Image (spheres, grey):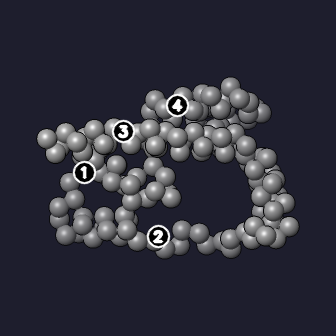
């Protein structure tokens, strides 16, 4: 099965999960429910901000990583690439066929893309929660 065919089987999976709508067509209303769910109930982490995200989780959940085993685990997750994180070949953005596949995926998942952009915004906003903690630790 081609990636473009697979993309047509599922759409907006994250919005569906967060809004509770698993079968009907997804609308802006579902996206807004998903955004509100993220805003109210989630500490956002981003893979492209992996180290910062894991540091926030450690702080928020009060994890104590003092043993050598815990330190090794933390170091392997915080600072190194995750082996096997993508077993599939990357799409070539300059290839017209791959561009077409990306357009299909983007169109099929436009509400998930909007939700992701909102999550990035929340990640930036949530930074203030951790800066306040860092400043109070210094005082």
Q: Position of residue 116 (x, y in %)?
A: 60, 45
Disc 1 designates what residue?
63
Taking depth in this image into account, of 102 and 131 the one nearest to the observer is 131
Helix, strand or loop at label 4? It is helix
Instruction: Report the Cα–Cα distance between label 3 and label 1.
Output: 20 Å
Instruction: Report the Cα–Cα distance between label 4 and label 2.
Output: 28 Å
Disc 3 designates what residue?
128
Q: Position of residue 44 (x, y in %)?
A: 45, 44
Badge 4: few (under 14), some or many (20 or more) residues near its Cα, within 10 Å? some
Instruction: Report the Cα–Cα distance between label 4 and label 1.
Output: 25 Å
121 left or right of 28 in image = left
Please say if 121 is above or below 53.
above
Helix, strand or loop at label 2? It is loop
Q: Which badge, 4 or 2, is on the more N-terminal residue?
A: 4
Instruction: Report the Cα–Cα distance between label 3 and label 4.
Output: 20 Å
Residue 44 appearing in the image = yes
Q: Which badge, 4 or 1, is on the more N-terminal residue?
A: 4
Disc 2 designates what residue?
82
Q: Nearer the viewer, mark 3 or mark 1?
A: 3
Helix, strand or loop at label 3? It is helix
Quadrant of residue 79 within the rendered picture: bottom left
Which label sits on residue 37? 4
């Amino acid at each position: 099965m081609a990636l473009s065919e697979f993309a047509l089987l599922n759409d907006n999976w994250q919005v569906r999960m967060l809004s509770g709508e698993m079968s009907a067509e997804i609308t802006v209303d579902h996206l807004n429910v998903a955004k509100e769910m993220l805003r109210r109930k989630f500490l956002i982490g981003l893979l492209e901000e992996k180290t910062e995200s894991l540091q926030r989780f450690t702080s928020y959940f009060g994890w104590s990583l003092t043993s050598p085993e815990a330190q090794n685990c933390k170091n392997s997750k915080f600072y190194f690439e995750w082996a096997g994180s993508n077993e599939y070949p990357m799409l070539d953005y300059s290839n017209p066929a791959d561009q077409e596949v990306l357009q299909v995926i983007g169109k099929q998942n436009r509400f998930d893309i909007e939700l992701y952009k909102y999550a990035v915004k929340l990640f930036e906003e949530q930074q203030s929660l951790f800066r306040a903690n860092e400043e109070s630790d210094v005082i």
